[in-house]
Image (cartoon, helix red, strand yellow):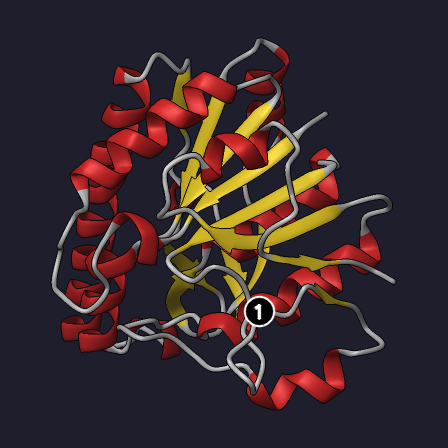
Amino acid sequence: MLTFLKLGGSLITDKRGDQSYRAEIMARTAAEIAQAYTPPLLIGHGSGSFGHVVAQRYGTAQGVRTAHEWRGFAEVSLVARRLNSLVLEALSAAGLPVIGFQPSASARCADGQLLSMESELIGRALSHGLVPLVHGDVAFDEVRGGTILSTEAIFVYLAERLQPKRILLLGEAEGVYGADRQIIARITPQNFPEIAAALGGSSGADVTGGMAAKVQAMLALAQRVAGLQIQIMGGSEPGQVAAALRGDLTFGTCIAAQ
């Protein structure tokens, strides 16, 4: 059963700082993944206080046109790769057969929407028991010149082609919170309109829309990929990641087609 697992930027970095990597949390998370790992598994991670802070400074998500903005585009790519290297090393040190795929090497967007990126080789890596690792990155854009490509957008694109059965989105928050600050157990197209107003953004720099954008993207995906189970959940507490990979989805927020 193919699983997509996202390590949110809020989990592995402090998004309120600048390039603040949570090495201990990442090491513990990597160990839990290795402990509970059953192939096939694809992992993605956000950019957190690495890519988001720099992208916000240059306005990269809105477009890249001037020489100054292209310099920023390159800088966002650099810091995103810096975090990716740290995550790659942590997962490898935990014993996972991880292999990195840099989205910006093949991704092509139009007005912020992902049109195409390499997926066939990712599928081949999965078939050989490897763990592909993708991450939030910059991307060339036919309308904006350049833009930011979120991990969720990558997951949506790959899910439609690789057909995972589970997507686990781990972050600092323990799930999706309603207006009463209680975790919403389940979100469907039927109840989404009434909870949409309660969805906030991010507590730190986030150029990809925060929680509201994440929920909307995942809800749309759940309606397009048959049998897909999506869980937004915390990963800060020891044991949460391993439990989720083993099938315990009794915590967090489930997003489903019905």
Task: Mark yes or no: residue 173 visible.
Answer: yes
Q: Quadrant of the C terminus?
A: bottom right
Image height check: is 90 above or below 159?
above
Q: Is residue 201 left or right of residue 37?
A: left
Residues packed near mark 1 inside 10 Å, few (<14), some (14 to 19) or many (20 plus): some
Q: Residue at x 14, y 74 (%)?
A: 68
Please, what secondary structure does the residue beneath circle 1 have?
loop
Q: Residue at x 55, y 85 (%)?
A: 180
Q: Quadrant of the N terminus?
A: top right
Residue 5 drawn at (x, y percent): 52, 39
Q: Is residue 99 left or right of residue 130?
A: left
Q: Residue at x 68, y 43 (%)?
A: 159
Residue 7's quadrant in the figure?
top left
Q: Nearer the viewer, residue 143 or 72?
A: 72
Image height check: is 193 above or below 172?
below
Q: Nearer the viewer, residue 96 or 77?
A: 96
Q: Nearer the viewer, residue 154 or 30?
A: 30
Outermost residue on the top side: it is: 128
Say how many tags the image has: 1
Residue 138 drawn at (x, y percent): 35, 56
Q: Residue at x 41, y 46 (%)?
A: 235
Residue 228's quadrant in the figure?
top right
Residue 89 drawn at (x, y percent): 23, 24
Q: Nearer the viewer, residue 238 or 74?
A: 238
Image height check: is 113 above or below 162?
below
Residue where numbered disc 1 is placed: 183
Residue 219 drawn at (x, y percent): 72, 64
Task: Mark yes or no: residue 111 visible.
Answer: no
At label 1, the amino acid type is Ile
